[in-house]
Image (cartoon, grey):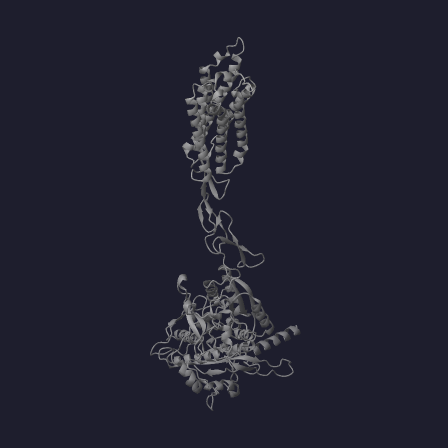
Amino acid sequence: MHIYLYTTIVFHCLYTKVENALCRMMGDPKYPLLFKEGDITIGALLSIHSKETSPSFEFTQKPQILLCSSVNLRDLRLAQTIIFAIEEINRSDTLLPNISVGYKIYDTCASRLSSMSATMALMNGAAFTPRETCSGQTPIHAIIGETESSSTIVLSRTTGPFKIPVISPSATCECLSNRKEYPSFFRTIASDYHQSRALAYIVKHFGWSWVGAVNSDNDYGNNGMAIFLNTAHEEGICVEYSVKFYRTEPEKLQYVVNIIKQSTAKVIVAFLSHVEMGYLLEQLSIQKITGLQMIGVEGWITSKSLFTPNSFHVLGGSLGFAVKNINIAGFSDYVIKAFWDTAFPCSQEDGNSSQGQVDCSRYQDLLVLKKYIEERPEQTYSGNIYKAVYAVAYSLHNLLMCKEKEGCEKDLTIQPHQVIEALKRVNFTVKFGDRVWFDSTGGAVAQYEVVNWQQDSDGSIQFKAVGYYDASLPPDQRFVLDTEIIIWAGGQKPRSVCSESCPPGTRKAGQKGRPVCCYDCIPCADGEISNETDSNNCMQCPGEFWSNAERNKCVLKAVEFLSFTEVMGIVLVFFSLFGVGITVLVTVLFYSKKDTPIVKANNSELSFLLLFSLTLCFLCSLTFIGRPTEWSCMLRHTAFGITFVLCISCVLGKTIVVLMAFKATLPGSNVMKWFGPVQQRLSVLAFTLIQVLICVLWLTISPPFPYKNMIYYKEKIILECSLGSNVGFWAVMGYIGLLALLCLNLAFLARTLPDNFNEAKFITFSMLIFCAVWITFIPGYVSSPGKFTVAVEIFAILASSFGLLFCIFAPKCFIILFKPEQNTKQHLMGKTQSKPH
């Protein structure tokens, strides 16, 4: 029980002591580099120096104060801009009329350690009066800074829980757009989302599909490069390498330089801050790596700190996006004179010691710049930080319910979270015409100039504006470039591709294990085309079209058929007409000698009918030549079938007559009365009518028709006659073959009959030739391609017709013309006597 009471009393005493505790600063206070007291205070964190000497952390003695060196002129200009804008506001009768605005500008020395120390000093104040208790109220109303994304992330995460608004003029990391993580962050510059995508657009605009990429190994570079790489992939741009380094990593820097040296890409996208770019420039100059087209970002593209005697050899012709350069009226004069006389703590002997004794030794390197006069001071981001100061002023003006002539209510207590809400509603126009407002992510609209590193005739370097990018415009109007005035690295526009473009008629084939921009150009296959550059696939031509020789256009396929104008057609027509002519001459000869024994003995009526049918056979071959039509297709096969059956029927009749004539010479035989002239005519008619019937059925059921054969040849169309019904065709051919075999058998039987002029011998020869031709025709017909199929059929018709003509009629014509003494009845009957020797 006693222990319990004792413990309770101890805890009560401790609680009471904590509740009444006084605020104490642990360690030495950190004072701002530039400061001024006011009714309201704006804090700022800037890297006015770029190098920091770290103290010893051996913990054997109290750590010394961090030492900073190497003045960063750009951030010094930003500090001067803050003071200039605040002085303007303090002189204004309309903006915060009876309120004095003060400032505390801390130097972070580009160090995370100093940045954190300065942040805590801003939030807590530098010192406390005796017996002062902790009020929990920050002495500042907003913080402007920092200039780099990584430092700004640290700052925003530190101040976020206390809801202190942070406004950066140049922290562009897209990660800061996350309102859940950074609800109190604002910026007067656009995020890198648009700039990173615009980098890919500018690369694509110039046809570069093979690039290298280098970025700062921090939040700014990593996030920006990630967006660029994604957009590049979407736009079909290949990145040969993507490397990164940080300013404190010389080994990685050397590795990056070696990669650049060994690469084949002629274009490098450098997503670097001006500090990293300075280190990279130095190494590229040492190793004399020139002629590379640099594509830069606002972080370094207009940084005058990169100007060195050798920098143009490396960075000449560089293209990149820059924040719009704004000339603030009166600022140049203020930098040269008023700043040093009124705002600088050690500009006068008495100094400004309202926040403790000022150690002027730490301003020695800044005092050197007092005599540094430029006609046009470097003002990168000056417009942005000017807008940031005025954004805070307008927010406070609204919160303090300021009215013209009546002034502001000084007694109101402004909480930081109120400033955040007021910043969200801010909307005004500064004196150089820019409208200031913050979007839902706390950022500004993306508006960039496209600048080009150019050299004047006097050797000085200038940043020539060659275009712009404005995200507030419609997509097709956002990006504008004037390529005529661009100066290129190496003197001419570089060509940076892994593989040259594939011309029309070819397609891209990826190289195994390499990016999609590395490919081989493969000619399109037959029947396929590509009619555009860098086609991924070849298109198949439609059915009746074929690719031209260049494989870039589909043209109508050549139509092939046996025509009258080609050599083969002319030759076949000649032999066809020659056969007709010979047949007509034989007919005339036989007609003129119709009363002679040799004509009478060979059944002149069947002979004339045979000559007529042979004439038709020669003529029907002409129907196979020329462009197939519906009528010609039906005519050619039926005419051929009927005329040949007529021809074979006549030959068969003559053969039967020979056999019957021999039988008639036998005693008591009257067989000729059964196969007289009437029966001969009827037999020819009957045999022919059977073929006519077959042809009529064929034409009725499934007639031949013109057909475009696109299967045999892919590159041309064979215009041919489709048989319609294969059964009909082979029925016609089979019937002809059947009659021919019958005729051959009968003639073969009659070949040895005794007679001086036995016609059966010649019929046998003619039928042998006929059968041999048509047996040979079948495999030739099946295997011959295109028009040669028709040529084979015509050849078979002509060959068999000539065989019949010459075998049957040539011997008779020879006797009529050259052996008239044998054209007697006695000689034919074998009753002539031999002449004595």
Q: Please identify the quadrant where the N terminus is shown.
A: bottom right
| Up/down of 804 relative to 78, above or below | above
| Up/down of 201 relative to 145, above or below | above
Residue 451 at least partly seen: yes
Residue at 58% across / 75% down in the picture? 248
Q: Position of residue 129 (x, y in %)?
A: 51, 84
Q: Nearer the viewer, residue 458 or 752?
A: 752
Q: Nearer the viewer, residue 135 or 678?
A: 678
| Up/down of 558 relative to 328, above or below | above
- Residue 62 sits in quarter: bottom right
Residue 134 at least partly seen: no
Most distant residue in the left direction: 405
Q: Position of residue 829 (x, y in %)?
A: 51, 16
Q: Please identify the quadrant where the C terminus is shown.
A: top right
Most distant residue in the bottom direction: 349
Most distant residue in the top direction: 668
Q: Nearer the viewer, residue 587 or 395?
A: 587
Q: Position of residue 681 (x, y in %)?
A: 44, 18
For residue 1, side relative to residue 700 (left or right): right
Q: Position of residue 696 (x, y in %)?
A: 44, 25
- How many marks the image carries: the answer is 0
